[in-house]
Amino acid sequence: TKKLLGVKGYYTNLPENIADDKASLDDDIYQISKFALIANIDSNNENPIFEMHDIIAQKILEINGDKKDKEVLEKLIDNLLLATPNTIAEFHVFRSGKTIFENFKVISKYTEKYKVNLLKAMSLNLYLLTQYNNYSDYNGAEELVLWFNQHDNAKNFKSFLMNNDERARYADFLQSIARYYRNRHADFAKSVQYCIKSKDIYENVEGYEEQRADLFYQLALNELKVGNITNAEKYVLKLKGSPVTFINNVEAILFYLKGEYNLALDRLNTLIKIR
């Protein structure tokens, strides 16, 4: 069953994010619901949820034809990416919205079937991989890691041909894979390998300061995991003054390893207050 979020929520508002004509969205939903093409399964006034049965969705796809389906799918992905917040905090709210993750998976499935532009598929899969890592769903994450590595090893991702946003997402995908190898396999060497490649890509990216800071956080954390305090300190310095709060996390570990327990405790207390 394909689920669509209602039109009142903010970051959880999938139809409003992907529709070209937002002004008519309420009426569009009302008109198609009259013919039982969709059903309201959650009448929450602020965020109603509608669903369309598989057989109806499949028939619509068949009527459109593959060429039209691909055009619509690519436009849908473009609109969705434009609506997706760039800041880490706002993106967390967005991706945690009810049925958002499910819809991302449905859309991603169709990118393979209709051979959607690879960079658009990469951007969509990045959000899925981020969520799989957050959920510790490493089987789901592994599929996307294999998908990415297959294309990357074949040199299908050409960063010099990407625009700034595409390069940022490419670098972020590498970061997400680094997180996967660290958290699932405790393979810190491979995690650092992906982080360094991501760092190289970020050299040609403008903006995305929070994502860049997250990269230094990961590099510092990997070095701390293997007890390499000197290298970790270099990356912690790069986090100074960054707009992120997880510097307290790595500094707590760093001070603990250096035997400065009072400072480590102070950083942990600061982290608890923030959270």
Image (tube, grey):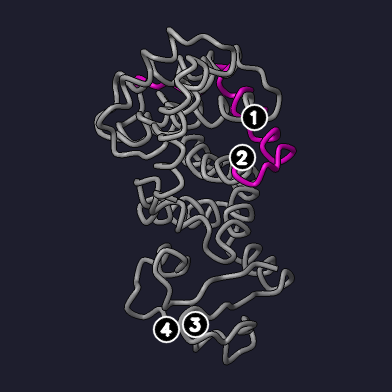
Disc 2 marks a residue whose amino acid type is Asn
Residue 162 spot, x, y in % from top left: 36, 28
| Mark 3 → mark 4, Cα distance in angstroms | 5 Å
Q: Tags 3 and 1 in contact by the CB under 8 Å rule?
A: no
As drawn, is 183 to the left or to the right of 194?
right
Disc 1 marks a residue whose amino acid type is Asn
Q: Is 148 situated above or below 13?
A: above
Q: Tags 3 and 4 in contact by the CB under 8 Å rule?
A: yes
As drawn, is 138 to the left or to the right of 12?
right
| Mark 1 → mark 4, Cα distance in angstroms | 43 Å
Q: Earlier in the sequence, mark 2 or mark 3?
A: 3
Residue for point 69% across, 73% down: 56
Q: Is 25 situated above or below 183?
A: below
| Mark 2 → mark 1, Cα distance in angstroms | 8 Å
Name the front one of labels 2 and 3.
2
| Mark 3 → mark 1, Cα distance in angstroms | 42 Å
- Which numbered disc covers residue 133? 2
| Mark 2 → mark 4, Cα distance in angstroms | 35 Å
Return the residue found at the far bottom: 34
Q: Which residue is mark 1?
A: 183
Task: Work out whether residue 188 or residue 66 is closer to the camera in this orientation and state it.
Answer: 188
Which secondary structure is most common in the magenta stretch?
helix
- Which numbered disc covers residue 29? 3
Q: Earlier in the sequence, mark 2 or mark 1?
A: 2
Q: Tags 2 and 1 in contact by the CB under 8 Å rule?
A: yes
The range drawn in magenta is 134-160
Name the front one of labels 2 and 4.
2
Q: Is residue 171 visible?
A: no
Q: Which residue is mark 4?
A: 26
Numbered disc 3: secondary structure? helix
As drawn, is 123 to the left or to the right of 154?
left
Q: Tags 2 and 3 in contact by the CB under 8 Å rule?
A: no
